[in-house]
Image (cartoon, rainbow, N blue to C red):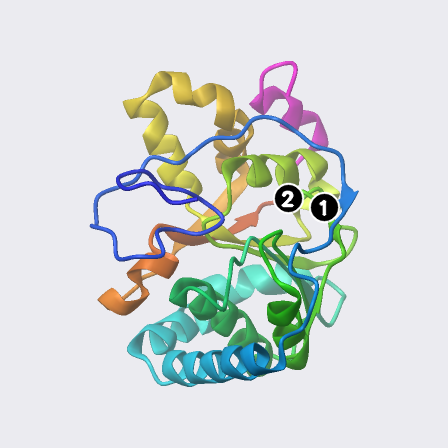
Amino acid sequence: MVNDGEWTVVLPSKRRQGRRKPKPKIHEEEEEEKPWKSDDLEIDLQRQARVKQKMENSIKKVESSKFYTTFLQQLKSPEVSDHFRLVLGAETQLQMVMYGVGSIESYESPRFQLSIAILIKREFDWVGDIEVFDPVLSATESSVMESLGCTVLSVNEEARREALKPTLFFMPHCETNLYNNLLKTNWRMDCLSKIALFGNSFQMYEEQVTLDPEFIGAIKRIVAARRVASEFAVDTVCDDYFPAFHDSSWHFFSSGLDSELPLLVSEGL
């Protein structure tokens, strides 16, 4: 989970961190998709009521914040909104898939992240249903998410979902291997062009390579994706939202030739 001074993903620090650039934690191993069941299988009605109240308070706080105003302004700007139109193509909605949200019962950052996802869906009619997965979610937390209009996935996809239709992958502070899995699964232009990705800054990963060349082995595909991606950094605006959204960006992938993609990564990826 979280170690001081090191950027753990799934979530950033659940406590306040300094503003230094944390070093991402890398997981290169791959696992097969498997059915998932929380260790906490019982819905506690008292906990459910408390968690739902926490989420409702979080949504209200985010919605009235300067951070959210700035966030919406960016999404509505011609530069970013044009990219969403390209991802949509002839479709009317983007499916939203949210990986690695974390415990909304225990920590504020996951509540802020889920709040933003819910508010985006409420604000834009082109955002479709929200699907959510994190192995830490309890049955109680899952029930609250479902009451807020989300669908909690029963299978751990390890972010290997193929974008056969326009999809918004909402993945702030996920582990590096999840971004690699997503890119590898969709490493052709007819899939990449259907993806809008909100998550860790790919530019930040590339900058990390200049500081630690050995790091490149774990993020080759992310660095390669930078060559065909347009990235728009998110401004956290105020300190309250720094832990939940620091170093987060929107990523869109430009159209191009499939034959060029294999040249962007080394053999064996």
User: Does 81 appear in magenta?
Assistant: no
**Mark 2: amino acid:** Ser
Q: Give me the disc on residue 157.
A: 1
Q: Quadrant of residue 91?
A: bottom right
| Residue 115 percent coordinates (x, y) | 49, 74
| Residue 177 percent coordinates (x, y) | 56, 35
- In this view, the residue in front, 56 or 131, is 56
**Pointers 2 and 1 in contact (C-beta within 8 Å):** no
Q: Is residue 48 left or right of residue 231?
A: right
The tag earlier along the polypeptide, 2 or 1, is: 1
Q: Against 228, is 19 above or below?
A: below
Q: Residue furthest top?
A: 267
- In this view, the residue in front, 163 or 157, is 157
Q: How many marks?
A: 2
Q: Is residue 87 left or right of residue 46?
A: right
Magenta segment range? 256-269
Q: Quadrant of the C terminus?
A: top right
Q: CA distance from mark 2 to mark 1?
A: 26 Å
Q: Quadrant of the N terminus?
A: top left
Residue 198 seen in this snapshot: yes
Q: Is residue 228 left or right of residue 155?
A: left
Pointer 2 residue: 255
**Mark 1: amino acid:** Glu
Q: Against 37, is 76 above or below?
A: below
* Residue at the image point whose x is 51% and y is 77% from the top: 51
* Residue at the image point whose x is 68% and y is 65% from the top: 94
Q: Quadrant of residue 61?
A: bottom left
